Amino acid sequence: MPTAARLVAAICLAAVAWFASEAVKPLFPEGTDFGSFNMVNVVLGLLVGWFILGSRSGRGYASGISNGFTSVIALTFWALVVQATNEMVDRSFRRFYDSPFEAVGAIFEIGLEYGQKMLDPTVIAILLVGGILAGIVAEIAGQRWK
């Protein structure tokens, strides 16, 4: 059921995804083509905000902070999976892999490589602070507009 808390949570996590995406870009080699990197992550932020963070609002501020943190973890996981899968598909079209099993296994390798690049303090700070703030704002919206 659509609620104000879900809408606010979706918008907040989409903003967190945008800022985190922008912070990650300088960590990749110069000249990397990001394509629709930001937009894919924003859509993931909208979905995670709507279905995870927004659905759990209304349980108190401590729960809101915890839910914001959990939502950022989920957003990061799904962003890594989607972006690694996208990279694997790109490489597959260039005949980089010898078998489908090698290609599927590469999703995990690429995801780990991307995850290591995200261990930058700026990216971690944006995700943590943004997630906690998104949780608090979603909680406020959930309490205000029941």
Image (spheres, helix red, strand yellow):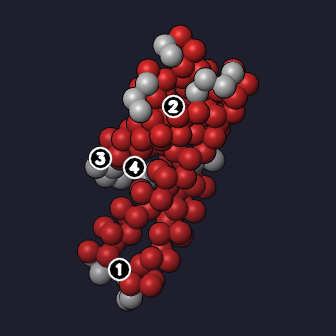
Q: Nearer the viewer, mark 3 or mark 2?
A: 2
Q: Which residue is mark 2?
A: 54
Question: Considering only order in the chain, which callout, 1 or 2, is on the residue closer to the N terminus?
Answer: 2
Q: Which residue is mark 4?
A: 30
- Count neighbours of disc 4 (C-alpha within 10 A) and say few if under 14, some if 14 to 19, many if 20 or more: few
Q: Nearer the viewer, mark 3 or mark 1?
A: 3
Q: Position of residue 79 (x, y in %)?
A: 47, 50
Q: Position of residue 126 (x, y in %)?
A: 57, 31
The kind of residue tagged 3 is Ser
Q: Position of residue 36 (x, y in %)?
A: 29, 47
Query: Which residue ends up furthest to the right in the rendered image?
Result: 62
Q: Nearer the viewer, mark 3 or mark 4?
A: 3
Dots 3, 4 in contact, CB < 8 A: no
Query: For the point 54% across and 70% down, which residue is it?
Result: 109
> Where residue 96 is drawn, which disc sits there?
1
Q: CA distance from mark 1 to mark 4?
A: 22 Å
Q: Which residue is mark 3?
A: 36
Q: Position of residue 25 (x, y in %)?
A: 44, 43
Question: Considering only order in the chain, which callout, 4 or 3, is on the residue closer to the N terminus?
Answer: 4
Q: Nearer the viewer, mark 4 or mark 2?
A: 2
The kind of residue tagged 2 is Gly
Question: Considering only order in the chain, which callout, 2 or 3, is on the residue closer to the N terminus?
Answer: 3
